[in-house]
Structure formats: C-alpha cells, structure tokens
Image (spheres, grey):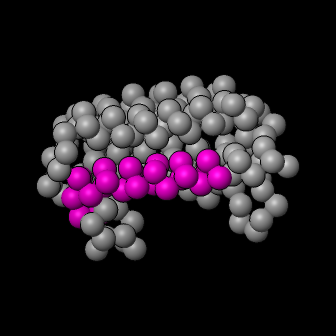
Amino acid sequence: MISIEDFLYYVDDALDAMVRIVSELGDDLANRRLDVPGANSPFAILTHCLGVMEYWGGEIVAGRAIVRDRSAEFRATGSVAELAHRAERARRQLRADIAALDPFGPPRGSPPAMDSTLPLARTQGGALLHIYEELAQHRGQLEITRDVLRSG
C-alpha cells in the first residue's frame, strides 16, 4: 500500500484536473450532455466523483453514516463555482476520513452487498483504490466530453 500522502497526491491531481475542466467550460457547457444515449454532463460526472469520495472514504473507510443518492448524482446540474467549492470541501473531508486508515483492515462501514466480495469492499485500502479508480476513469471521460462539447 502506498502512503496516505502519495495517495492524496494522485487524488488531488485528478480532482484538480476535473475542477479545471468544468471551470473552463462554464455553467452552460458544464451542464450540457452529449447527444449520446446515457451520456452525462461534465457537472454530473464531477458530482458523481464527489459522491464516490464521500461514500467510499466516509462510510467504508471512516465509518461515518452516509446517505447517498447515486442516481441523483448523474442528474445533477448547477453552478460551476458552487461545484468547485464542493470539490474543495470533499477534498478536505477525504483527508479527515482517511487519517486513521488501516489499509489492510476491514471496512468500518457496510459496503453494498453486490460489492462485498470484491477487493474494493474487503479492506479499507481496497476502498481507497476504488476511489482513485473512479476519479481516474471519470477524469478521462470528462476530458473526452469536454473535447466533444467544445467541437460542437
């Protein structure tokens, strides 16, 4: 397992890039969906990533009870400035949530039943890797979405 500081370096890099993208797009384009079935807006993609950080870091690693509406994350719209502010709060909260990390220890919260046998739900370290996996995956999605939105 890597150090918490190294993990947060990679999280910060991905989160900074995603915030930069939605900020550069502005409220109009950041809230626009591509004309592709199932496409998500840049605003919704980043909102989902913040939900991932809160749930997997807060509930699974730290043991805080989190009420999450995952499907609402993908319908989210709003102000880019407020979303950037929420991203900063999420970044600080993740740091607090993983301060007492036991990377090989079991989750402190209850992972979804469908995930219970997967590495992401077996250990706190697995949950952290899942957070980064989601951020990296959605960063790429956000970059492509930005490029297509700008070309239109």
Left-right relation of 102 to 89: left
Question: Which contiguous range is marked in magenta?
Answer: 121-144
Q: Is residue 80 visible?
A: no
Q: Quadrant of residue 109?
A: bottom left
Is residue 69 depicted above or below 29 in this figure?
Answer: below
Pick the front one: 39 or 83: 39
Is residue 148 depicted above or below 80 in this figure?
Answer: below
Kindly identify the residue that appears in the image at 55 percent across and 31 percent down: 86
Is residue 67 depicted above or below 11 in this figure?
Answer: below
Q: Assign the magenta stretch its main secondary structure.
A: helix
Pick the front one: 128 or 144: 144
| Number of disc labels | 0
In magenta stretch: residue 68: no
In magenta stretch: residue 123: yes
Kindly identify the residue that appears in the image at 23 percent across and 64 percent down: 122
Left-right relation of 50 to 106: right
Is residue 118 depicted above or below 56 in this figure?
Answer: below
